[in-house]
Image (cartoon, grey):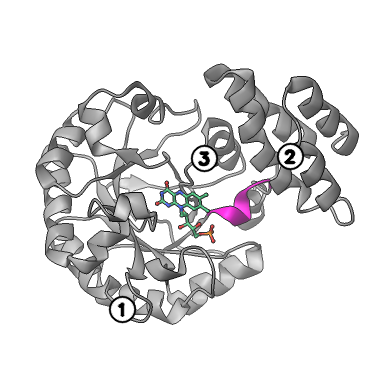
Amino acid sequence: MKSKPLKIGNIELCSPALFAPMAGYSDLGARYLARLYGAGLTTSEMVSAKGLIFENKETKKLLEKAENETPFAAQLFASDPEVLFKAVKLLPDGIDIVDINMGCPAPKIVKNGEGSALLKDPVLAGELVAAAVAASSRPVTVKMRLGFEMGDFAADKVARAVEAAGASAVTVHGRYRDQMYAGSVDKKGIRLVRDAVNVPLIANGDVRSVKDYEKMMEETAADGVMIGRGALGNYRIFAEISGKKIDRTEREDILLQVEYLQREYPERIVVNLMKHHVTAYASGKAGVAKEIRDRVHHATNYVELFAVIDEYFKS
Ligand SMILES: Cc1cc2nc3c(=O)[nH]c(=O)nc-3n(C[C@H](O)[C@H](O)[C@H](O)COP(=O)(O)O)c2cc1C
């Protein structure tokens, strides 16, 4: 499927299919693979603007990027424009785009007025974008949901407010905060946001195949599509979309993910993070998916982790 190039500010992306930020899942290795297979953009896991200001070590680590991640977006969450302004000023070189999280449904984020809580306050959403725009010359984007409470559609107002404040693109996950990650994605809702703004619109939610991607593009008239869970253990979806030819085995991909995590974390954390990833790869293996999931779930060290990888992902 041929679509026009997606440009965010002055940055032209090589593909309109983007890899979604997913805290705890879209780590360096996952993002490296997404880019290798042709994703047009990768974004850091969400990072606290306050954490950046207080020079939290873990926060800084989340902003490290793999060698093929250019352009790369840093996603920040905040509810205070002044805090966000300071945080954007502190972003390291190598960050090309600043994305503001207005979609996270987690109670600990929402209770601070951050993430999806901003869907209830388009004025503050605009002020946050204005602060980020004032703090650097990088394009600023926003990732949001359709609204906070189910049926209380707000994304059109929020999108207009952030566009007026200088946002260069808007990503819409077609669910309400109440839905968390379940229930169906409302493509008509995303389409309404498309019609509300002139900046590029990136549609998101439940895209798991090239067919889903094409339907999402067509039904929402979006300029791009962001893929999250559907790309985990299935990074080749980006190659299928762009027509890129890459000859790699799942085993090579899994081992690469282990290697990337090993650069950053001790054995216990690597094994825990790999449980998610191996489970994701397993979901494509009919008949043994549950067995793999159960086995990897009980792994506590490298010997047990590699035993599962060696048995089920031979080549
Ligand atoms: C485990 C998990 C972590 C997530 N973390 C983030 C995050 O840090 N920032 C963000 O904007 N969205 C986050 N999301 C939302 C995804 O980016 C995406 O909007 C959502 O999963 C819907 O897309 P999908 O159906 O393609 O996965 C997360 C989703 C999941 C499942």
Which of 260/108 is in front? 108
Identify the residue at horizontal 31%, vertical 37% (top origin): 96
Residue 157 shows up from this direction: yes
Q: Position of residue 265 (x, y in %)?
A: 55, 20
Which of the numbered marks, if any, corresponds to residue 70? none
Q: Where is 259 relative to 102, above or below?
A: above
Q: Look at the numbered disc 3 and say if its residue's Cβ is closer than 8 Å to ligand 1.
A: yes
Q: Position of residue 113 (x, y in %)?
A: 22, 55
Q: CA distance from mark 2 to mark 1?
A: 39 Å
- CB under 8 Å between discs 2 and 1: no
Identify the residue at horizontal 67%, vertical 48% (top origin): 236
**Badge nearest the viewer, 2 or 1:** 2
Which contiguous range is marked in magenta?
228-233
Residue 231 within the magenta-colored segment of the rendering: yes
The residue at which mark 2 appears reads as 297
The residue at which mark 1 appears reads as 153
Which of 115/295 is in front? 295
Which of 173/137 is in front? 173
| Kind of residue indicated by mark 2 | His
Q: Look at the numbered disc 1 and say if its residue's Cβ is closer than 8 Å to ligand 1.
A: no
Residue 43 within the magenta-colored segment of the rendering: no
| Kind of residue indicated by mark 1 | Phe
Q: Secondary structure at mark 3?
A: loop
**Badge nearest the viewer, 2 or 3:** 2
> Which of pointers 2 and 1 lies earlier in the amino acid sequence?
1
